[in-house]
Amino acid sequence: MNVANSSHHIRETSFRNKQDKYQERGNSGARLQIFRSAVQRTQIMCGIAGALGFNGEKVSPEVLERMVGLLRHRGPDSSGVYSSDTSGVGLAHARLSIIDLSGGQQPMANSDGSLWVTFNGEIFNYIELRDELVEAGHRFKTRSDTEVILHMYEEKGEDCVRYFNGQWAFAIWDAKRRRLFLSRDRVGVRPLFYTRTAKNFVFASEIKSILTHPEVERTIDLEALDQLFTFWCTLPPKTMFKGIQELPPGHSMVVEDEKLWIWPYWRLETTRILSFGNFARNLAADFMCVSVVFMSRI
């Protein structure tokens, strides 16, 4: 058994033993259901990667395959790549199948092929958004939340992210406008890293995937190293590698004509003050939920 399989086996065994313990103690009802739901949530993730050549040169499918190959632990069910012959864009995806198991393959295109998306995450309100889009005249080929993102972009443009309730990191290639649009969820649950070289813009869910691109250099950022020793982490947008940055939570980005634009689409409302009573009740509810999910009865 290789290391990856061994680790996966250990995690599965740990979860199974925990569930068996609940059952033995007669707690196989709501408590076990909450635990199973929490476990499933922690396992929901895919991997995305891609590149945009500034000179319009086709992105090598082999490069995309190498990039997504290092993300297979994030999406073990399937993988796919898209490389345009004319626009210089390439997208890759490693999938963990959660919604629409048969119809949600990525990268995914819209009906006329003018939009392509690679998406990691889950849009919790995609059913409601889909119903609204159908009423507005949109037609769907799948039942996936990925396709809802495409249609929302058609309807709202870059403002589509303001309507999403969920966690996400995605990139949309807009062929008509020849621009790459990227976005990350409000609190940064899903990771998204990027870098710019002399000829390419490169992005991925994990830095090691970016480092497989032949133009990306591996140089330690000493300022980020200082942050690591000071705060135990780097501060976005910095990472440990010089030139490789993290798209901050609650931000979107456009890459067009060799230029990058980054802006916040959401900020935490710090002016709203909860009463102490509400704060205490919310804190107690959160503590009870965590206790039920992750602690067994003594």
Image (cartoon, grey):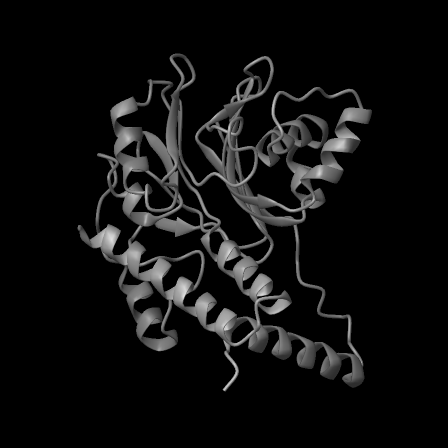
Q: Residue at x 37, y 31 (%)?
A: 79
Residue 113, above or below 202? above
Residue 152, x across and y down, in percent: 68, 31
- Which of the 4 quarters of the picture holds residue 212? top left
For the residue pair 162 and 267, the one nearer the viewer reads as 162
Number of marks drawn = 0
Residue 236 found in image quarter: bottom left
Q: Residue 214 appears at what percent x and percent y?
A: 22, 34
The residue at the point 77 percent across, 25 percent down is 134
Residue 135: image location, x then y, percent: 82, 26
Q: Is residue 120 left or right of residue 94?
A: right
Residue 15 screen position, x and y as percent = 41, 63
* Front in this rendered view, residue 93 or 272: 93
Q: Is residue 84 above or below residue 129?
A: above
Res. 9 image quadrant: bottom left
Residue 140 placement, left or right of 184: right
Residue at 44% from the left image edge and 43% from the top image edge: 46
Is residue 51 in sight in this rendering? no
User: Which residue lies at the image location 32% right of the left edge and 48% below the top edge?
Assistant: 207
**Is residue 78 at all visible to an observer of this figure?**
yes
